[in-house]
Amino acid sequence: MKAYFAAGCFWGIEKKFASIPGVSATAVGYMGGDQPQPSYQQVCSGETGHAETVEVDFDPAQIAYADLLENFWGMHNPTSLNFQGWDIGSQYRSAIFCVDESQQLAAEQSRDAESASGRHGEPLVTEISAAGQFWRAEEYHQQYLAKQSNNSCPN
């Protein structure tokens, strides 16, 4: 099964999702915009409307979608509108892109619970919407941090 999350720079988020038991594969790309087959440079311009997004392939028998959502909230600051850490722009927004109505409902319930938890001093700004076309990013972005010597990201 697939899930799609945006939470700032996709390199760090991909690495975090890839380490979760039950996640079989991850890929980074772009979702939520209006330009077909966008390049990294186009998305970074902030003019395509896309968010840097991680595609997560998971086995629901090993990990529930609700558990992926719980992990998502802890990976970034969901109160930051259009930025995470040093990355600024709508391409770094917090978003959950849902593949069906059950994911939509679970994401909304999870957001409401996270908002009520008291862990955040400000309102959550995470976008929850239907998944559109996932445009896979250029190959050099895939598992980027695993290819780097410092193997870390500010997210």
Image (spheres, rainbow, N blue to C red):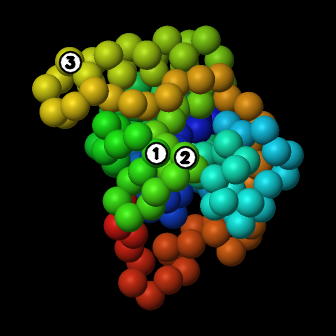
Q: Which amino acid, by three-letter code, is at mark 3? A: Ala
Q: What residue is shown at x 65% (from left), y 23% (from top)? A: 130
Quarter of the image with the N terminus in it: top right
| Cα–Cα span, label 1 and label 2 | 4 Å
Reading the image, the residue beneath label 1 is 82
* 135 relative to 152, above or below: above
Q: Secondary structure at mark 3?
A: helix
| 10 Å crowding of disc 1: few (<14), some (14-19), many (20+) | some
Depth check, mark 2 against mark 3: the one in front is: 2
Taking the image as shown, residue 74 lies to the left or right of residue 152, namely left
Q: Quadrant of residue 34?
A: top right
Residue 116: mark in rendering? 3
Quarter of the image with the C terminus in it: bottom left
Taking the image as shown, residue 99 lies to the left or right of residue 35, namely left
* Of the image marks 3 and 1, the number of the one nearer the N terminus: 1
* Of the image marks 2 and 3, the number of the one nearer the N terminus: 2
| Cα–Cα span, label 3 and label 1 | 22 Å
Residue extending farthest bottom = 149
Q: Where does residue 85 sit, x and y in percent of width and height?
A: 34, 59
Q: What residue is shown at x 82% (from left), y 45% (from top)? A: 35
Q: Which amino acid, by three-letter code, is at mark 1? A: Asn
Residue 54: mark in rendering? none
* 126 relative to 155, above or below: above
Q: Where does residue 148 sit, x and y in percent of width and height?
A: 50, 83
Q: Where does residue 105 sit, x and y in percent of width and height?
A: 49, 12
Taking the image as shown, residue 19 lies to the left or right of residue 140, namely left
* Of the image marks 1 and 2, the number of the one nearer the N terminus: 1
The answer to whether the residue labelled 1 contacts the one labelled 2, judged by CB atoms less than 8 Å apart, is yes
Reading the image, the residue beneath label 2 is 90
